[in-house]
Image: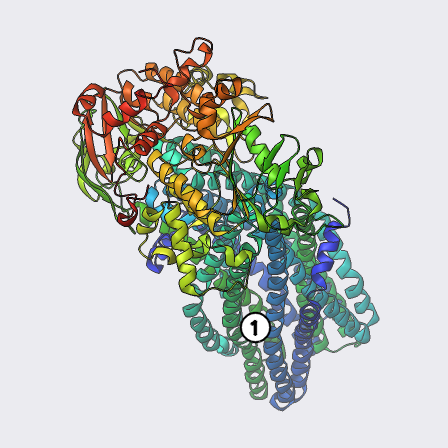
Amino acid sequence: MLPIADGARVRAEVASLIRGHRIVLSVVVALQALAAVAGLLSPWLIGRAIDALTNGTSTSTGIGLVLVALVCATTVQALVTRFAQLHALRLGETIFARLRERFLRAVLGLPLAVVEAAGTGDMLARTTTDIDAVAQMVRFGIPRILVTTTTAALTIGAAFLVSPMLAIATLAGVPILFAGTRWYIRRSIPAYQRQLASYGRLIGVVNETVEGADTIDALALATAQQAKIDAALTERRNAEWYTLGLRSIWFPSTTLGLLVPVIVVLLVGGAALDSGIATAGQVAAITLYTMQLSGPVEELIGWMDRIQVGAAALSRIVGVEDVDAEIRSSHPDPLDERVVAESVRFRYPEGGEVLHGIDLVPAVGERIAVVGPSGSGKSTLGRLLTGIAAPTSGQVTLGGAEMAQIPLDELRGRVALVTQEHHVFVGTLAENLRLAAPAASAQELTAALEVVGADRWALSMPNGLETHVGATGVLLTPAQAQQVALARLVLLDPHTLVLDEATSLIDPRAARGLEQSLDSVLEGRTVIAIAHRLHTARDADRIVVMRGGVIVENGAHDELLAADGEYAALWAAWSSQDSHPA
Amino acid sequence: MSRGGPFRLLWWQARRQPGTLAAGILFGIAWMLCQVAWPYLVSQAIDGGTAGGFRGIVPWVLALAGVALAQAGFAVLRHRMAVSNWLRSSLSLSRRVAHHSAATGAAIKAGTSPGEVASTVANDAIRIGELFDVTARFSGGVVSYAAVGAIAMATSVQLGMVVLVGMPLLVLVMTAFLRPVQQRQARWRAEQGTLADLATDTVVGLRVLRGIGGEAYFARRYELGSERLRRRGIEMAQVSTWMDALQILLPGLFMAVVVWMAASLVLDGAISPGELVTFYGFSVFLIMPLRITVEATGAFARGMVAARRMTDVLAVESAVKDPETPVPAPETATELADVASGIVIRPGRFSAIVSDDPASATTVAERLARRDDRSLRESQVLWGGTELTRHRVKDVRDRIVLVGSDAYLFSGPLRNALDIREVRRPGLPGSAAARRRRVDDALAAVAAQDALDALPRGLDEHIPERGSNFSGGQRQRLSLARALLSDAEVLILVEPTSALDANTEAIVAARLRRARKGLTTVVVSSSPLLLAQADEVHVLDGGRVAGTGTHDGLLRRADPVGRQYRSVVARTVNDAEPDEPVVSNETWTGSIDTVWAQAVSTGSIPLPHPITNPDESEED
């Protein structure tokens, strides 16, 4: 799992959000206060009317005036509320937009190993459910909390204006509310985090069910997968039931906390009537105020509950930024284009060492082919040479600067990696290509597609470059996706690039031509090709043979043949075949 | 989709939880009635206080305390039932959709993306849960409204009429204004969906982005989408805030009218001042059922949309179905014959299918394994002499297993992800030690010890979805081990070693044959290492068998079949062959892996140590 930010961090985050928007927030609070005052006029007017009616001093004209006053008050309240809400929502939308943009930037900056270890379920839950929970909080929660707090404060204030002595009685429920809510909140935060995690797990299981649908069918695994789904659902149910259990204690305490004051006010009011300190109208007004208080206070407490969900979600979102803070903190400037790998060792967090001391210094403009069986650490070396991961010991540098410490936006454009893994992003084909070169013109895009032999199918699609592709559009074949990946590379034009079996999915007949046309485009660039075809190796300036995480042979084609090692044996085996030209 | 679909689904679910629904309605009513009691009791207390001071108030206060306790109790029960309603329905429907997608095979992928199904399970199920929750609360609201109306009627017919007629009128006006809000909501939601897709894409495609540094451009695209969504949100707020205003204005006006009428009645001496407070209290209380009704309108609409989406997913049918009158499964060791290609798979043999068009060989394999009944309707496969489609799907899947080159590894402990026999045939005897041995054997057969060694907890290690912590080659070997552990009578493997390097492939090819001894195995491959192991190799041309023989025999054959075979298999057609100059470029497409494997198999390169267990290094 990815990290979760602690409470202090989340509070600081919220505080800085409030500080950043304090002017709009004060406008919202002022408008809400005005609306609340208008809302409080009704009980006051009714208290006055009751006094007048019991004293027998009221007339039908007086009652008519009360009606007019009530109508005016409610109209003002409605209008002012509308504008207050509009400001609040506008603010909420803006805060939320900035928050999700920040979050996405953080995700984009995450170290790959972290994302891979966390699994897609956790990440997807954060990008969807958690973002939604925070959105709910920001769009509705914050405005409503402002409204209810203001209304509650003003209601109590109004009660004090009517009769300070009776008004104190309205606070009788505070100890109950405070104790109950405190008890609850202490337990609810981890409970809601568990609830959100259970949700992520369910989404993950469903995703794999659909993605692996073929395999489930072929191996008759449906029952097993259904059992897994059930386990995820059970965890979801248990998580929900646990929070429900917490609320089952908390809710009645709030109900009592809201009703007890009404009873206390009436009792005190009765005594006050006996001693002539208060009038029936005053008692009625304060009783009404107390009852009216229960609406906003209950809503406020309800939001306390949802704040927990929002805060839990926010802590997961902000937590992603915590990961980012760990890397690329220094900003050394590369002096030149030279890539140097010195005594590089690498160990995955939960596994054995895969590279045991690699030294590799490609000359600028050199083409190196890396050859070796799978599991020999070729791909890992590729990732280290492009600064995607940092070596466990030893170092990989670019122009003297530590590769993995160079900020990503500075690093790309200089050093790039294309693997056999391919992904077509949701959007148009042009957008997919422009990932590598945002400013590229349509002509440049077409030219890049031509280099990789993809112009034919690309331009014959319904809208050409503007055709919508990816998960929600036209689905490209793996070979086409790989061509797109290579076209991106052409557009990116870095001085150093690592190709990790980047043409493995393309028809071998076409791949040879593609690699030749790529070569001509990449003239003068340093290319490290993790080769899976012998011609790539022979064409290279230098061949590096890897085995078991070490370089066993290193030299030009002819040198290696002369050395009579594994490469020579490989070559001999190949060229001795009777069906093959030597 | 039939029009009754979503209703039927909701009805199906409602019948599964009649108890919680009824209890939800009952406790909802009890809770609301407690709240109806407050204005009445408070006004009685005030009247009592006006008349008799403290002594006049006390009995009413005691009654209020009783109601307060009851209300607190009902609040909990009501909430528990509301959550039960919500949770039971949403989880049960989640389960139904998720189970359905597990059972329909590849068909689920054809019409929907994984994200859509996940969203149906996660979000639509919750929308329907809300529908069930709001139904219970709405019923409580209706009853309490009727109760208030009745009390008002008993006090004054005039006031009672205002309450009874006024409330539905308010609901009507408010729901009428709901439409423009919902329209903008729909637009906002569409925009939000697009943005969510983009965010999901980021997570999935991060590796690719990282390699080429597309992060900034991608972030820019996301920010543009985010800004559009923000604008839509503000557009929505401009309308929805009027709705908020209306929710204050209409009940406020209603309350003003009620108070005015009640005050006039007090003036006439028809009711007491305390009763005026009651009516004020009622008009304040009625805001709640009013809000619930408006909420319910929205929740019903959303719930129906969700139910419709869910029925769409549930309408996806599996590509294979049991026939109405299935024939009994044939004896073990039965011949499997593909009529269209003329390929006959003989029991107990290790056969291979080769074609210069890999897709046509895969098609044959998929027919043999009955992946899709539609393709079998046109060209049948005979299993023990009867059409494959006339057998039960379970019989076929239990005995014939097809594994593609990109088989999916599922999350969970590695042991369970691999050893699927328990799942496929529960209740088979076997000790834990025997099970462990089986798994070890299978892993040894596919030379996957390196993948296992990298895991600190070995077979107990929890692996992520897709087995994404493994390399492509490791994944392929593990999925091959899983296929071996299925103990299928007929195992059909499509390009099972495509992601393996040559020396591993050489080891796997030899051991695979041994592991499948006595059972039927079919491989679709053009790898000479695998083909050399086959008892017989079928060469396809244009979807028909052009010739059958052994690898060595076919390599030596001088006829067109032999030439075709060599061109596919060796991927090394001789430049010197003047009659086929077109394919001369293929000379250079021979992969290092293939060559390496051949070198390994001839002994010119020694077997690498990291891959092989020391005790096994001599056997190959």
Q: Disc 1 marks which amino acid?
A: Thr
Residue B160: x percent and y percent?
A: 80, 69
Dot 1 falls on which chain? A
Vertical relation: A244 (above or below) A483: below
Q: Mark 1: which secondary structure?
A: helix
Q: Residue at x 79, y 65 (%)?
A: B164
**Residue B512 vs residue A437, the one in the foreground:** B512
Q: Nearer the viewer, residue A521 or A402?
A: A521
How many C-alpha atoms fall within 10 Å of the one at disc 1: few (<14), some, or many (≥20)? many
For the residue pair A118 and B294, the one nearer the viewer reads as A118
User: Which quadrant of the figure contains the C terminus of chain A?
Assistant: top left
Decide if residue B559 is on the left or right side of residue A554.
Answer: right
Question: How many discs appear?
Answer: 1
Q: Can residue A120 be spotted in the picture?
A: no
The answer to whether residue B129 is left or right of residue B600 is right
Q: Which residue is mark 1?
A: A290
**Residue B40: quarter of image:** bottom right
User: Quick check: A217 above or below B360?
Assistant: below
Residue B316 position within the rendered picture, expressed as x and y whole percent measured from the top left: 67, 45
A405 sits to left or right of B351: left
Residue A384: x %, y % from top left: 26, 36
Residue reaching furthest to the top? B578
